[in-house]
Image: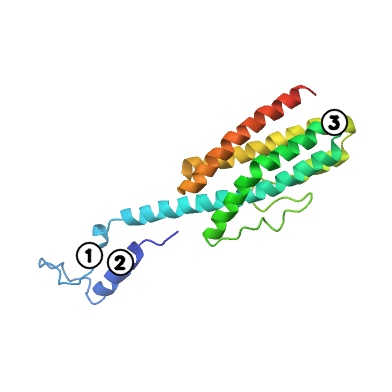
């Protein structure tokens, strides 16, 4: 966050007053040209606006990076579903998700590159590992899928996908409400709409098990 100009102004005022003794009364004469204004005359409004702007920029960047991390986790979940759930609709759903959401991720990667940021996913996102971005890991779920009996795998997988997809919706909602970049907010709105439809489909699948 950018530093306020108040600190610099106070320091300059302190230097200007350093030569005065405590017994000297304030002069009734107007200050000489170039004399710094007293601290009470400095309005902090500009600093507050800068802070808001910085926070909003950080929201955009955090959203973009978190979406990359969430996408890496989703790829792990989809792969785990295809490998452990002996149902064709799981493979079909995995292909559907990648086809629908892959282009959004590429748009986010392009945005990061255009803004001089890394478009690579977090390095710590490997099989069974948690991502660097907060609350996006799936290590515990992947372990449960490996240990579960065949009859429970499908239910566990859908429940995990529901939890994960809700995290995506929450991240997109935060960007819509707090972000300022028009392109990212538009992407977030599309992601939210798509993922809410995914949640409805996953819940329908869960009811059939």
**Height in image: 182 above or below 33?**
above
Q: Which residue shows up at 85% across the image and 41% down it?
A: 83
Q: CA distance from mark 2 to mark 3?
A: 66 Å
Mark 1 falls on what kind of element?
loop
Left or right position of 3 against 198: left
Can residue 144 be seen in the rendering of this structure? Answer: no
Q: Which mark is residue 37?
A: 1
Q: For the N terminus, which image quadrant?
A: bottom left
Q: Quadrant of residue 166?
A: top right
Q: Position of residue 93 (x, y in %)?
A: 74, 35
Left or right position of 23 against 200: left
Q: Which residue shows up at 54% across the image and 53% down it?
A: 61
Q: Position of residue 59 (x, y in %)?
A: 51, 49
Q: For the C terminus, which image quadrant?
A: top right
Mark 2 falls on what kind of element?
helix
Q: Are marks 2 and 1 in contact (CB under 8 Å)?
A: yes
């Amino acid at each position: 966050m950018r530093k306020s100009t108040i600190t610099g102004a106070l320091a300059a005022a302190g230097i200007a007053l350093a030569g005065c003794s405590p017994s000297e009364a304030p002069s009734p004469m107007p200050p000489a040209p170039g004399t710094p204004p007293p601290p009470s005359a400095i309005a902090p409004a500009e600093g507050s606006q800068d802070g808001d702007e910085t926070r909003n920029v950080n929201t955009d960047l955090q959203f973009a990076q978190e979406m990359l991390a969430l996408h890496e986790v989703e790829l792990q979940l989809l792969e785990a579903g295809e490998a452990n759930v002996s149902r064709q609709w799981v493979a079909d759903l995995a292909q559907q998700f990648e086809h629908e959401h892959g282009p959004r991720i590429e748009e986010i990667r392009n945005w990061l590159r255009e803004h001089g940021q890394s478009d690579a996913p977090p390095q710590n996102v490997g099989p069974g590992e948690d991502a660097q971005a907060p609350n996006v890991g799936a290590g515990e779920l992947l372990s449960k899928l490996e240990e579960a009996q065949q009859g429970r795998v499908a239910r566990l997988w859908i429940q995990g996908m529901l939890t994960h997809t809700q995290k995506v919706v929450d991240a997109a909602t935060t960007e819509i409400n707090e972000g300022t970049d028009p392109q990212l907010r538009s992407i977030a709105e599309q992601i939210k709409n798509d993922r809410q439809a995914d949640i409805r489909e996953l819940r329908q699948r869960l009811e059939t098990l």
